[in-house]
Amino acid sequence: DETHALVKEQYALLNDEILPLLASEGIRFLKRGDWSPAQREWISAFFFREVMPVITPIGLDPSHPFPRVLNKSLNFAVELEGRDAFGRSSDAAIVQAPRVLPRVIQLPRELGDSEYCFVFLSSILHEFVHELFAGMKVLGCYQFRVTRNSNLFVDEEAVKNLRTKIQGELPQRHFGDAVRLEVANNCSEAMTEFLLGHFNLTERDLYRVAGPVNLVRLMQVPDWVMRDNLKFKPFKPG
């Protein structure tokens, strides 16, 4: 499938060419295993101050069904063992990352051995997700994203006010039928099958990715890096 091949090529270019070249220029994207003690302390404080207050994990059980997942939003599927602080047992949970949270975080320069050091929000959540499930053991945590059908179906001849009808339909674009599922390439088979089943998708609709599910969020990084020699010159029409 051409689409799968293109996505695979995207992440190969990111991991094998772009990130190593950026690192050689003093611009690093740190994995969890690369964090120094000082960096980890700063990231931990960031998690408790900025991230934890705005996320609500949802344990999946008969009284807590699967939450509605917005189109192209960042989510995490968590595999659990044990009982929570209220004595409830759940073997899975969903953590939704609000769009107000930045997907890429720049560390203070004094904490890094490179001029620019960044971490992904997904790395931070993976590292500290256990803090959201007191008394339970986290067996796995996997980012995923769902792409939904955002087409509008409006019969222009059957409605009196087309503008009002379209305005009423727009919010539903976030919850159209799922057409694609992106998951971390280390997502367990059991969780992958569970997500595919929930969204009524097949293996053909599945994309395993080796990095952040939304590469578009990396487009903000050049604005933070003051290195004109690494950027294309602005185009000026003649």
Image: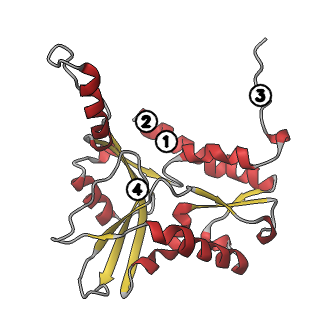
For numbered disc 4, what is the local secondary structure? strand
Amino acid type shown at disc 4: Phe
For numbered disc 2, what is the local secondary structure? helix
Mark 3 vs 4, N-terminal side: 4
Residue 7, horizontal then vertical, whole percent: 49, 41
Amino acid type shown at disc 3: Pro
In the picture of the structure, the residue carrying the numbered disc 2 is 3
Label 2 CA crowd tier, 10 Å (few <14, some 14–19, many 20+):
few
Q: Is residue 227 above or below residue 79?
A: above
Determine the residue positioned at 65% across, 76% down: 40
Amino acid type shown at disc 2: Thr
Mark 4 vs 2, N-terminal side: 2
Residue 60, horizontal then vertical, whole percent: 25, 69
Q: Nearer the viewer, mark 4 or mark 2?
A: 4
- Quadrant where the N terminus sits is top left
Along the viewing direction, whichever of 124 and 46 lies nearer the viewer: 46
How much space separates mark 3 and mark 2, taking CA atoms? 31 Å
Q: Is residue 180 above or below residue 32?
A: above
Amino acid type shown at disc 1: Val
Residue 17 as seen in the image, left or right of residue 154 = right
Query: In the rendering, which numbered label is found on residue 144?
Result: 4
Label 3 CA crowd tier, 10 Å (few <14, some 14–19, many 20+):
few
Q: Extreme right residue here?
A: 229
